[in-house]
Image (cartoon, rainbow, N blue to C red):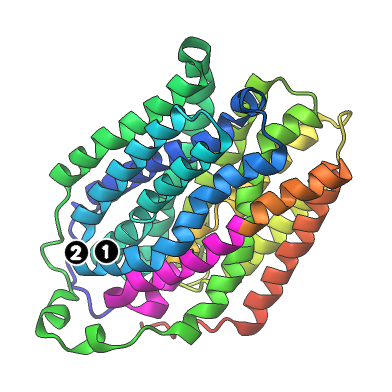
Amino acid sequence: MGDFPSRRDPFRWIILALISVSHIIGAAAQYGINTLAPFYQEELGLSRAQVGLFFSSFYLAMTGASFGTGWLADRFGVRKTTLYGHLLVGICTIAAAFSPSFEFGCASFFLAGFGYSFLNPASTIGVMAWFHPDERATAMGAKQTGVPGGGVLAAILAPSMVLVIGWRGALAALGIINFLFGFLYAALWREPANDPFASADQSGGGEIRESLNVWGLLPISCATAIYLIGQMVLITYVPLYLKDAMDFSPYWASQALALTQAGAMVGRVGWGVASDRLFGGRRKIVLIIIGVLSALSIGALGFMGAGSSYFFLLPMLFLAGVCIVGYQGVSYALIGEIAGKARTGAGLGMMITINAGAATLGTPLFGYIVDRTGSYEIGWQVLAATICVGILGLAILLKEPKRVS
């Protein structure tokens, strides 16, 4: 913490709000894919696995592009990369809204995912520059609430828009919002007046010359890849699970997803505060606790049927949101600390590439398991067991950087 000036710029909270809104807008288009699934699945004649492939197409682009876009964020800064990201997400989401076929939809969502891959590295660099280490996980968690916040927005707004303008109009509206917000973000963004890393970067010495700590980043990247499979499966299949197995209407199945996303908003801030304050800046133990609670809550879904009480089902969906959808603020803070600020974009890009690759395979695989077995219960139990593998990997392989007092 000694690298930072003693005075903390109060404008950092406005910057944090701007970054968070950016995530809300971007994620609303992203989560429109699964929120609107009960509406477009029948019209386009899709299986559950194909619905998962729509979301996987989005993440496949992130798999191939995140390391490169992370490098671009390190090279060109937050303003430009965020602007380009929102413009591409917006244009490609609008294209997906007019999809005549499964193949066209996959291609459109693939390109939208490429645009989205610009947003996380850029925003993480922004938090690393503006916030001190003793509040960084809290800030990361706060900005990451924008992702489930976008999910809540999509879950509440999109089904209501469907009633007025259809699912195509609802999806197109999410794209238009992204396109316009990109210009607003570029107009409002500014760099910190006292960036403690600027002198090292400008001099060409210090951290900027260091290579990326690949071996230090691999354990957290691989473990959180498994966590992300759980996250993507949950937010992709909860609406279909509630409609098919729990007898919810398509409208209320989509609305119920907002409960999981609301839990994620609580978790992303709460886990960051816990890591910074309760655990003295330690990240590993917090990620292990999150994994254990995630496995328990998702495993509990594997023992429910159509006759299960809503008073048990809904709290489990909320808890799963708090944990498996709420972990990323802590993991992003840890990535920045392992990689260092000058390599934050590349480090985060590496993690997202590994994470997205796992999610690309894991999300439709869950749908395939459900299609073949005819049972969501088996799917949830397999997912809970997989998360336990990620917990073991964190516990055994991850080494945190030493804390500087």
In terms of secondary structure, where does tag 1 sit? helix
Q: Mark 2 points at which residue?
A: 76
**Marks 2 and 1, Cα distance to the nearest angstrom?**
5 Å
Tags 2 and 1 touching, CB below 8 Å: yes
Q: Does the magenta stretch include residue 347?
A: yes
- Image coordinates for residue 196, horizontal then vertical, percent: 18, 74
Nearer to the camera, 239 or 105: 105
Magenta stretch, residue numbers: 333-360
Image check: 122 left or right of 198?
Answer: right
Tell me which residue sits at (64%, 64%) in the image.
226
Q: Name the residue under label 1.
A: 73
Image check: 119 left or right of 355?
Answer: left
Main secondary structure along the magenta-highlighted residues: helix
Image check: 242 left or right of 309?
Answer: left
Q: In which quarter of the image is the N terminus?
A: bottom left
Can residue 277 be seen in the rendering of this structure? no
Tell me which residue sits at (63%, 20%) in the image.
251
Q: What residue type is labelled 1?
A: Ala
Can residue 315 be seen in the rendering of this structure? yes
Q: Is residue 163 magenta?
A: no
Q: Which amino acid does label 2 sit on?
A: Phe
